Image (tube, helix red, strand yellow):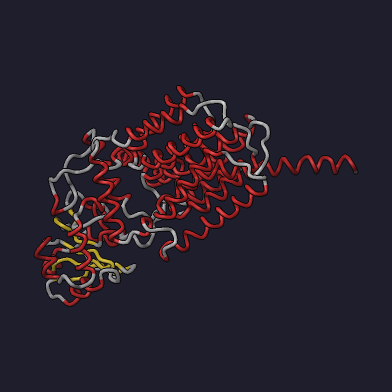
């Protein structure tokens, strides 16, 4: 009887370790089951295809009807090219897996470094689970996933506490790649310099024996990496214009986390923060000053703009892993295999059983139906629809607006607001763009949709999911079938 009880006692920790090791696979499964919802990934993929075909950044505007031939900033050009190549190879299913691995890879990289340095499996798993819940609303197929991966790799280098030369040798390529994959390496500027500052404080106060030369060097190099793109210094003006337009248009991710539009997303962030503080107090203040400095800096950034929550979540991994449990033995080869095998299984099987789904707010059906009519020219759509229109119809179709906030001047966005509010009439829109078709959200762009419904010059060829499509009435004779109702 005693032997049976001892066997059960020994088996229970083994089962617990197995369940903990499955958490990364579960997070991957959750991510793969989510629909694609980001409206901008479509124009980014089409632009990526042009970049790949050309062998480098596209120098002039290809999509916007009123900006054709103007200089085009090379924003996230490498990320767009990589994602377009992945989609060409394996379609949306492969792209979805690739993006999820990049997004989660940032969390896994720093978690693996924590585990390698002795953090317990349970503590690392708790950290991954908590931050995953907090960051999940930001997850979709888009180049920002590269930024998450690169940031996680840099924090992993910090956690491994490498010597200065190997840290710089490994970190510098990550910084340069990051800025070209997604131009947000300014986050690394803040994080690395905060960590280096904390390291110097510890050294000057006698709490650390080694000077943080590696982090300091990467902090300086991260500033230089901001300009290590084809755009050079002009990337700053482009980023500033994008931020200003985003705020003016009302993009919620650019607003403080306490605004009503971000209430639902703020709740898990608050819960994770409170739980982390409780764990730290419970462990008697077991923290690393450099890690805490990074988290505090990113917390301030997240409070002012929700879009930084992804980086905040990655930075929270080592803090929670340190506070959630005592240090243990380093991971064994069998532990790594226990983690990697389910990950590989999920990555391969999930796309076969659950193909890529798209959010119903995307006008995919409407635009596919429009393509049957063989129209050519400018397709006027709500600016969130511009990406789908570009991806589906370029080069036959141009757009009036799309999600590239930096592409259009402030006056153009104000004009767009006038159209949506009914101040600018249909006749002016037609005069300005001479549209070959309209693709509209009939609620968001209600005045324009109602004007088209009343007009004898336009006919509705599609209505569904709250989206309507109109073409000039003369096209009716050449249309390949009746419109769905």
In the rendered view, does 305 fall on the left or right side of 381? right
Residue 136 in the image: x percent, y percent?
A: 48, 52
Residue 348 shows in the view: no
Quadrant location, the C terminus: bottom left
User: Looking at the image, which residue is at 17% across and 46% down?
Assistant: 61
Q: Residue furthest right?
A: 1
Residue 159 in the image: x percent, y percent?
A: 53, 34
Give the total number of marks visible in the rendering: 0
State which quadrant residue 183 falls in. Answer: top left
Residue 265 shows in the view: yes
In the rendered view, does 439 fall on the left or right side of 336? left
Q: 443 and 179: which one is in front?
A: 179
Q: Residue furthest bottom?
A: 454
User: Looking at the image, which residue is at 31% across and 52% down?
Assistant: 40
User: Looking at the image, which residue is at 63% across and 44% down?
Assistant: 285
Quadrant location, the N terminus: top right
Q: Residue 217, relative to residue 410: is it above or below?
A: above
Q: Residue furthest left?
A: 431
Residue 464 in the image: x percent, y percent?
A: 31, 68
Q: 25 and 252: which one is in front?
A: 252
Q: Residue furthest top?
A: 165
Residue 238 in the image: x percent, y percent?
A: 24, 46
In the rendered view, does 94 fall on the left or right side of 16? left
Q: 344 and 478: which one is in front?
A: 344
């Amino acid at each position: 009887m005693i032997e049976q009880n001892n066997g059960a006692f020994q088996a229970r920790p083994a089962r617990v370790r197995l369940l903990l090791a499955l958490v990364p696979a579960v997070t991957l499964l959750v991510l793969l089951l989510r629909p694609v919802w980001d409206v901008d990934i479509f124009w980014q993929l089409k632009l990526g295809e042009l970049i790949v075909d050309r062998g480098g950044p596209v120098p002039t505007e290809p999509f916007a009807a009123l900006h054709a031939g103007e200089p085009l900033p090379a924003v996230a050009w490498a990320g767009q090219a990589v994602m377009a190549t992945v989609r060409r190879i394996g379609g949306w299913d492969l792209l979805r897996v690739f993006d999820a691995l990049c997004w989660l890879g940032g969390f896994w990289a720093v978690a693996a470094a924590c585990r390698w340095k002795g953090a317990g499996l349970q503590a690392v798993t708790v950290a991954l689970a908590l931050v995953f819940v907090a960051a999940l609303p930001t997850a979709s197929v888009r180049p920002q996933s590269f930024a998450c991966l690169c940031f996680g790799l840099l924090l992993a280098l910090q956690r491994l506490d490498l010597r200065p030369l190997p840290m710089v040798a490994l970190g510098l390529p990550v910084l340069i790649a990051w800025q070209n994959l997604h131009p947000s390496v300014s986050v690394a500027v803040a994080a690395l310099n905060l960590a280096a500052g904390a390291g110097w404080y510890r050294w000057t106060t006698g709490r650390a024996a080694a000077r943080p030369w590696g982090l300091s060097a990467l902090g300086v190099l991260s500033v230089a990496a901001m300009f290590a793109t084809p755009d050079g210094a002009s990337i700053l003006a482009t980023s500033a214009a994008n931020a200003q337009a985003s705020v003016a248009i009302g993009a919620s991710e650019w607003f403080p986390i306490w605004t009503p539009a971000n209430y639902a997303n703020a709740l898990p962030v608050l819960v994770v923060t409170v739980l982390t503080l409780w764990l730290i107090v419970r462990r008697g203040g077991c923290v690393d000053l450099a890690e805490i400095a990074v988290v505090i800096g990113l917390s301030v950034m997240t409070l002012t703009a929700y879009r930084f929550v992804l980086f905040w979540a990655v930075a929270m991994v080592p803090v929670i892993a340190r506070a959630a449990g005592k240090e243990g033995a380093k991971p064994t080869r069998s532990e790594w295999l226990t983690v990697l095998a389910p990950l590989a299984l999920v990555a391969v099987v999930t796309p076969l059983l659950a193909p890529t789904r798209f959010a119903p707010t995307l006008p995919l059906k409407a635009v596919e139906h429009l393509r049957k009519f063989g129209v050519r020219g400018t397709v006027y759509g709500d600016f969130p629809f511009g990406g789908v229109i570009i991806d589906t119809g370029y080069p036959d179709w141009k757009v009036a607006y799309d999600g590239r906030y930096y592409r259009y001047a402030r006056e153009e966005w104000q004009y767009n607001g006038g159209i949506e509010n009914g101040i600018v009439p249909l006749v002016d829109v037609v005069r300005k763009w001479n549209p070959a078709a309209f693709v509209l959200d009939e609620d968001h762009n209600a005045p324009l949709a109602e004007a088209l419904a009343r007009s004898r010059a336009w006919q509705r060829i599609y209505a569904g999911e709250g989206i309507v499509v109109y073409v000039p009435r003369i096209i009716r004779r050449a249309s390949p079938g009746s419109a769905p109702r």
